[in-house]
Image (tube, rainbow, N blue to C red):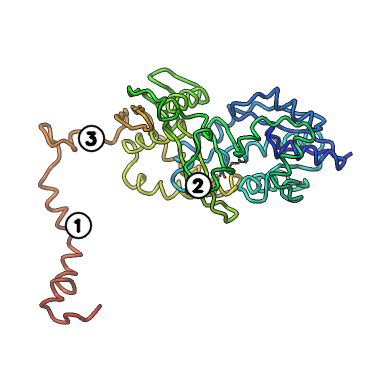
Amino acid sequence: MKRVALAYSGGLDTSVTIRWLTERGYEVVAVAVDVGQQEDFALVRERGMRAGAAEVRVIDAVDRFAGEFLIPAIKANGLYEGRYPMVSSLARPLIAEEVVRVAREIGAGVLAHGCTGKGNDQVRFEVAFGVLAPDLEILAPVRDDGIPREKAVALAEEWGIPIADVATSFSIDENLWGRTAECGPLEDPWAAPPERAFARTAPAQNRPSEPAEVVVGFERGVPVSLDGTARPLPALIREVDALGGRYGFGRVDMIENRRVGIKSRELYEVPGALALITAHRALETLTLERDVAHFKPSVEQRWSELVYDGLWFSPLRAAIDAFVDATQSHVTGEVRLEFSPGTCSVVGRRSEVSLYDEGLATYGEGDAFDHHHAAGFVRLWGMPLRVWSEVQGIGAEASGPGAGSPG
Ligand code: ARG
């Protein structure tokens, strides 16, 4: 009997995949990876077994997810297309690693996933599988057998696979970094998202009216404390996420460019991720030297594209991480975040190694800036343009020789 290790979420598509594989004579070991989703893993196990898995392994990878994936994401201010903190993109390479590890343990010759052909997750799984285990076969029945969603729903019912949220018809993915929703009523980009699409962020009528403040402490780019109290990263993220969620902060409704070429309408709930990236950026404004501050965002964008596009296991991603790490040596200090309904604002920041010099910045007493130097600097700064203007520029056009002729 051929053994297969399957990336198992407990959702509709992966449950159908278990049954499809067992009906074709495979022995399925379903690997469910806990990356901080609010999931009842006893139920996940039960679904997997009812669908026909020989075994369902639940792997607690929350600390690894935070330490090895979210820390680099925070340091790189990772946002795809400037808005999406890459909830699913960051989890897939970790899940792929865990699935490969189980496959090696049980001597499986096949790796499988339950992704469709339209999404990015198939790309992320298969590229990662290809890097980590090029010798293993890959099966993707939902995609390659073309099981449409309606049929999958019918099959799940027929087989008694208890899928709790089929009725909502959204496709949901969730972990410590946030929650994603797509499909169903969201497919019309003109239609406002129904309130039932949200789970981690309060609706407008339930948000507290009094603002709340939290101080996030960072060490070398990593959030380490809240209001002065040290916290392990997963707990810290959960706390900020819950606080932001109460204020309804962190809803992202966007049309996004998938790697497979499709534009899609996506809904994200990412209060913790956005608040922490906002705070991290604020501390960088204080502690990064000017050229580094101006250069880093271009690298952040590339990093985000690589991660989104399924290229986590790539030499470029590793090299960019090394660069980003080098920029974080002094990103240490504290940021005051204020939440009010629907928003999160930075209202203060401080650092022992701040490059902000009040003596240089002040317009008041104690000004340490030598204004005489400014006059000479400005003269030299503008000199090339003054020469250009005199010889070829706007002034010459009107009056000088060669007026009107270019170059
Ligand atoms: N569009 C997001 C991404 O590509 C979310 C994908 C969610 N995946 C899912 N199977 N529901 O990262």
Q: Which image quadrant for residue 87? A: top right
The picture places residue 356, in percent across and down from the top left corner, at: 26, 35
Nearer the N terminus, badge 1 or badge 3?
3
Q: Which residue is mark 3?
A: 357
The picture places residue 58, in percent across and down from the top left corner, at: 70, 27
Front residue of this view, candidates 322 and 90: 90
Whole-angstrom CA distance, mark 1 to mark 2, is 34 Å
Q: Which residue is mark 1?
A: 381
Q: Residue at x 74, y 40 (%)?
A: 154
Say what amino acid the circle numbered 1 marks.
Trp
Front residue of this view, candidates 293 and 56: 56
Q: Are the residues tagged 1 and 3 within 8 Å (C-beta)? A: no
Does the numbered disc 2 mark a residue whose Cβ is under 8 Å from ligand 1? Answer: no
Nearer the N terminus, badge 2 or badge 3?
2
Nearer the N terminus, badge 1 or badge 2?
2
Mark 3: give few (<14), some (14-19) or many (20+) Cα within 10 Å: few
Say what amino acid the circle numbered 2 marks.
Trp
Front residue of this view, candidates 350 and 160: 160
Q: Residue at x 80, y 32 (%)?
A: 53
Whole-angstrom CA distance, mark 1 to mark 3, is 23 Å
280 displayed left or right of 143: left
- Asked which secondary structure carries label 2, the reply is helix
Question: Is residue 79 something one can see in this rendering?
Answer: no
* Image quarter of the N terminus: top right
Question: Is residue 182 shown above or below 228?
Answer: below
- Asked which secondary structure carries label 3, the reply is loop
Q: Which residue is mark 2?
A: 303
Comparing labels 2 and 3, the label whose residue is closer to the camera:
2
Quadrant in which ligand 1 is drawn:
top right
Residue located farthest toward the top when viewing the structure as drawn: 229
155 displayed left or right of 318: right
